[in-house]
Image (cartoon, helix red, strand yellow):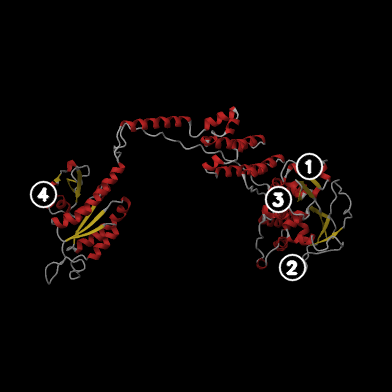
Amino acid sequence: MGQGQLQGGLLWSYLGHGAMAGGPEESSLSNPAFMEYTSHVFGDVTVVVQDCPSWDLLDSDWASVRSVLEQADILVIKYSINDKLAFQQVRNGYAPRLRPLLRHWGVPVILVAVGARLNDEGPPCTCPLCASDWSSCVPHSEGLQLSRDLGATYLELPSLNHVFVGRYFGSVLEYFMIQCLKQKAKERPEKRRGNKLNEPHPPHLEQPARLPPIRVEESSFSKDLQWLLERGGQFADVAFYSGDSGKELGWGHAAVLCAVSPYFRQLLLGPKARERPISRCACRGDGGPPSLLSTWDGGLGMEDGSRPDGHLAGRLSRLVVKDPLLCLCLWETLMFLYRGAWEWEHLQEAVGEKLKNSLAVAQLMDRIRSFLGRDKGSRDTPNARPAQLGPQSLVNLFNSPLYSDVIFMVQGNVLPAHRAVLVARCDVMAAMFSGKYAEARSRVVPIHGVSSDTFLSFLEYLYTDTCCPASVLQAMAVLVCAEMYQVKRLQHLCEVCVCAYLQSMPSRELASTGISVIRLLRRAKCHNAEQLYVWLLHFIANNYLIFSHKPDFLELSEEEREQVERLRWPSRGYLQELSEYQQRRRKLKKSRCLVM
């Protein structure tokens, strides 16, 4: 392409006489479809133009054309208004290939329509809304739609004179040039006036070390109650007998059965139950299920005497199992109830293996479902699964006199409890109530050295398997009580609560709080809370600037202080570098004049 052909181009017209055509050997982006020339704008900014005068040339080698487009800062697309066929080729052939590339690169695009629309009745019309030549010229709406598809800025230039090219096209092109130069200035490490080579750099502050995690054991609530059913016959107060043979089928605990099952609650706690020794059925009438169990009070003649195991005398309720299917699977049913009605599928599988009859299994499962109680809607769906109780099955027994057989006296407050639950959940209390101790024969047990609120929180965990202390100090008090009774999981839950409360405090509150973290550290070490002890050491080290200025910081032992100094944040090295940096900054400010 010669010099005369270049003069007809849009960018050549904008750059003027300063543009210089270059040979292919001078360009790293040389391509047969492009002609390269350079110029200068804004005084000292070099502009390199890769110009393709014909769309047909792009088809010669699209791969190399794409490599040229990838390195472009601004893309200018020009078409003639009077050549509608060429415009349709651009819109239908090249625009679909350019659209995904432009969206990926984010390059600014300028779409320029050059030429005046023809008018048969007079001179060419420059109005974009004129519709007299839509058959042969490109309408304004189609060009605007193409610009929207490409995400481009749309311009219409009636001719390539200095007015339209310099004022309209040039102002848009210069705007994108300025934006491109600003972007390049951000990406290029430039020596600014305030950042010279001898300017000191601030030291890098590392992130504080992560605090060690507190590990909590999985809940053993269901296993504890299973142990109570299997080996807690010493504290059983319910005996099951076969209605046909009178044979003893098993033992149970009225507190657990009444807490889990509304059926047993109605059966064992009916009105005037202890005044007349006659049979009582809980599920007869009112459209309920058939009678499954009945009870006679005083049936064994042991109501007023001592238990055969030699422990505190208590009422013994005798339940007669009338249903033959329930007699066969009473152990599986009781195991299901004691584990909190949590394993319905396992119960169904165990019953199926024992009965070997699907119809009998369905009937028995429906009767077991009646033990747990069900709403009216579930009666129409025989396969409906009952609500899972889990650790919440004993929540109604907590601090309740219902079937209570022991009373704790704590600071003058009366706290009722149930030996069966305490023995199953706490090994120390199992030894206390099972061995030859005074607590095994006494109904009232005094508790010393623990506050009433703390011991009530301890009992709440035994019954509900949850712990929610209201403050750091209460959590530490419950931790001490858990260590006293050797309940490890509760101890670890209290450790988690203490860590959560301390981590939630902002630095200002941590500096002004009356809670002594150093004394918490001492108590954690004294009561074998090893995880909390290690966590508090790291917590003190991560907040070294706060705790090192407190008087109780001197209470740390030499070994603890060495560990805190080793883990401290920020480190001594960083503080030394920061001090040197600040001194250099002060010297620089004194040695030069700053003009705002």
Comes first in the chain, label 3 or label 4 = 4
Q: Which residue type does callout 2 highlight? A: Gly
Image coordinates of residue 207 in percent, x first then y, are 47, 38
Question: Mark 4 — residue?
Answer: 3
Classify mark 2: residues with Cα within 10 Å, few (<14), some (14-19) or many (20+). few
Closer to us: 311 or 52: 311
**Are circles 2 and 3 on residues that touch, CB within 8 Å?**
no
Task: Tell me the residue that label 1 is attached to.
Answer: 432
Task: Sort mark 1 into few (<14), some (14-19) or many (20+) by Cα contacts within 10 Å.
Answer: some
Among numbered discs 2 and 4, the one appearing first in the sequence? 4
Distance from disc 3 to disc 4, alpha carbons, whole Å, reads: 96 Å
Point out which mark residue 463 bears. Answer: 3
From the top left corner, tell me how far across and down residue 525 is, in percent. Answer: 64, 34
Earlier-in-chain disc, 3 versus 1:
1
User: How far apart are labels 2 and 4 at the CA level?
Assistant: 105 Å
| Residue type, numbered disc 1 | Met
Q: Which residue is mark 2?
A: 288
Indicate the amino acid at tag 4.
Gln
Q: CA distance from mark 3 to mark 1?
A: 18 Å
Q: Could you tell whether 145 is left or right of 397 in the image?
A: left
